[in-house]
Image (spheres, coloured by chain):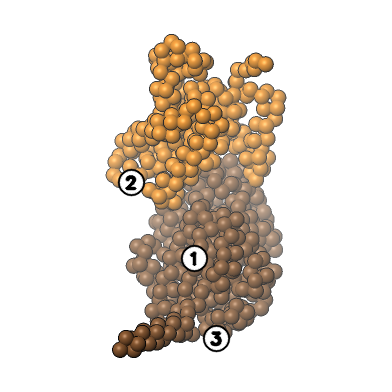
Chain colours: A brown, B orange
Amino acid sequence: MKRFFILSAVAAALGFCAVALAAEPIRIGAVLSVTGPASFLGEPEKNSMLMLQDEINAKGGVLGRMIELVVYDDETDVNKAVLATEKLLKKDGVAVALGSSITGNTLAMSGKFVSAETPLVSLAAAEKIVRPVNPWVFKVAQSDRLAVGRILAHAKSRGYKNIALITVSDGFGQAGREVLKEMLPAEGFTLAADEVYGPKDTDMTAQLTKIKSAGADAIICWGTNPGPAVVAGNRIHLGMATPLYMSHGVASKKFIELAGAAANGLLLPASKLIVADQLPDNDPQKVLLTGYAKDYQAKFGAAPSQFGGYGYDSLLLAVRAIEAAGSDKPAGIRAALEKLTDVSGVTGVFSMSPGDHNGLSESAFVMVEIVDGDWKIIP
Amino acid sequence: MFGGLLQYVISGLTVGSAYGLTALGFTMIFNTTGVINFAQGEFVMLGGMMSVMLHQAGLNLPAAVILAVAAATAVGAAVERLAIRPVRRATAINLVIVTIGVSICLRGLAMLAWGKDTLRLPNFSGAAPLPVFGASLMPQSLWVLGVTLLILLGLRLFFSRSIHGKGMLACAYQRKAAYLVGISVERMAMLSFALSAATGAVGGAILAPLTMTSYDVGVMLGLKGFAAAVLGGLGNPFGAAAGGLILGVLESLGAGYVSSAYKDALAFIILLVLLFVKPSGLFGRKSAERV
C-alpha cells in the first residue's frame, strides 16, 4: 500500500512536470523607461503591455502557450538600458524584445540585438532607428517624417511661407529638427528662424522674441512635455498671434492641462487614439481604438495616451509574428515581423517590408486643433 | 530692436531671480556652517510643489503659498538637525556629500508622494501681459522681482539689526570666537538651514506659475544657483543675488543674440573667464590664506 502511494506520487509529479514542460511560456522581454524623465512614456507603455498580455493569455495564449513578459525599468538611463538588455539576452533568454521608450536608449541597445540575432521592436520615435534598415530592429512609433509631412501639407493649404522652428535639444527634438530642415526647402518653404531650448528650460521668451522679429508666418515647435507648454505660454505672454504647430510628442491631455488656456488654437498632428470618438465608422482602427481606450481607463483609472499605444502595438506585432512564424525561434520571428501586413494597431495600420521596418503611412496621423481645451479633427 | 533687448532683459531678470534666491540660500548656509548645501535646489522644489499640492487640496493661493513656505522651512530645520548635526565633526567635504544624499532623498520622496508629472500653479494676479516699451511683461514677473527685492531687504535688516542675524554673521567670521562669546553655533546652523529653505521655497512658489514645477526641478536650479553664488563671490549674500540676476540676463541675451543652442554654454563660459580673472567672484572679499 505504502509503495503504491509513493509510486502514484512520483507518477503524479512526473505528469505535472510534463504538463509544465508543454506549457512553458514564451518569454518576451521589455526594457522601458518606467521612471525618470521619460516616465510619461514608459509607464503607460508598461501598463498597456501587461493589459494586452493578460488579454492574450486569457484567450489561451499564442501557439497554445502562455506569454510571459519580462519587464525591466531603465530609469531613462542609457547605461541601465544596456545592462537590462544584457540580462534579457543572456539570463532570461527571450524570443523577442520590446523597447526602449526613448531613441537614445534604443540606439544603444540595438547593436546587442544584432549580435544576439534576436529581434527588437522599439517604442521610440526617431527615424534613424529603422533608417538605414537594421535587419533585427523594428519600431512601432510613427516616424517624424510622417508628422512633418502632415504639418507641412496643412501649412501649405493655409498659404504660410516663412516657417520658424523651435526645438528641444534632446534626441526627440533634434531628430525632428533635422527632418524639418530637410523637408522645409524641399516643400517650398523658407526657414525664418531656427531656435533651440534645453529640455529643462523653464523660459523660452528669448527664443520667441527672436522669432517674432524674424517675421515668421508660422512656428513649428518640436518637443515633449513640459517644454512645449512653456513655449505656448510664453507665446501668449509676448502677445504673439503667429500660428503655432506642435509635434505629435505632446498629444496628451497632460499637455492641455499644463498649457491651460494657452493651448487653445494650437495645431498638431496626432495619432487617432485621442480623437477615436470623432473618427468615421469605416475607419479600420476605430473598434480597436475605442476598445483599448475603454479597457485602459477601466483598468488603470487614467486616460489612455498614444504612448501606451506604442506599448500595445509592440506586443501585438511581436505576438502576431510569433503566430505567423509558428515557433518562438528569434530568427523566425524576425522574418515574420518583416512580412506582417495590414495589422491594425493603436498607432496605425502596419504593413512591414524588408525596406520599411516601421510600416506606417501618413494616414497614421490626423491634424487636430485644440479648441476649448479639447481636440478637434480638422481637414 | 529696443523692444527685443528689453524683452531679453525682462525674461533674464525673472529667471535670474530664481537663480538668485537659490544662490542666497547657498551663501547663508555656507557662511554659518562652511557647508555647500546641495539640497538647496530641493528646497526650491518643495516650495513650488507643496504650494501646488495645497492649492489643489482646496486652500486659496496665499494660504497655500504661506503654508508651503512654512513647511519647507520646517524641512530645512529638520535636515540640519537630523542629517548635518549628528555628523558635524566630519570634514566639510563629507558634509557636502551628506547634503547630496539629502537632496536625492528629498527628490525621491517628492516623486513618491506627488508623482512624476509637471504641475502648474495659477498666476497670482491675472495672466494678461502688460506692454512696456514694445516688450511685454507678465504680472507674475513683477511679483517675482518684487518679492525677491523684499526678501533681500528683509535679510539685510535681519543681519544688521537682529541679535540672531548678528549671531549668524559672527559664526561666519569666527566660529570659535562666536562660541566663546556665548553664541550657540548649533542653533545658528539650524537657523541658517531654516532661513535658506524659506528663501528657496519662496522662490519656488513665486516662480511656479511662470515656469511650472515638478519633483526634479531642483537639480538644474541647484546647479545654476551654485554657479550664481560663485559668480557673486561665495560668502556674500547680496553678491549671490546679483550673481543670479546677472547669470539669468546673460543666458537670455546669449539665447537672443548669439544662439539659443549655446545658451547654457555661453553663461558658463563667461563664469569661467570671470573666475580666471577674479577668483573670488564679482563681489567676494579677497581671502588671505595664511601659509
Asked if residue A102 is positioned above or below residue A313 in the image, the reply reads above
Q: Residue at x 49, y 17 (%)?
A: B175
Mark sitting earlier along the chain (1/3): 1
Q: Are marks 2 and 1 on the same chain?
A: no
Q: What residue is disc 3 on? A: A326
Q: CA distance from mark 1 to mark 3?
A: 24 Å
Front position in the image: A105 or A159: A105
Residue at the location (37% across, 41% down)?
A: B50
Mark 1 surroundings within 10 Å by alpha-carbon count, few (fewer than 14), some (14 through 19), many (20 or more): many
**Mark 2, mark 1: which one is toward the viewer?**
1
Residue A351: name its quadrant: bottom right
* x then y, percent, for residue B205: 41, 37
Residue A300 in the image, given as x and y percentages of width and height: 36, 64
Q: CA distance from mark 2 to mark 1?
A: 34 Å
Q: Quadrant of the N terminus of chain B?
A: top right
Give above or below for A115 relative to B6: below
Q: Secondary structure at mark 1?
A: strand
Residue at position x 56%, y 54% from top? A77
Report whether B279 appears left or right of A224.
Answer: right
Q: Is residue B46 left or right of residue B274?
A: left
Q: Is residue B101 visible?
A: yes
Q: Residue furthest top?
A: B181
Front residue of this view, candidates A317 and A13: A13
Task: Give the number of the disc on residue A71.
Answer: 1
Residue at mark 2: B56
What type is the residue that disc 1 sits on? Val
What amino acid is at disc 2?
Answer: Gln
Say how many tags the image has: 3
Q: Residue furthest front?
A: A2
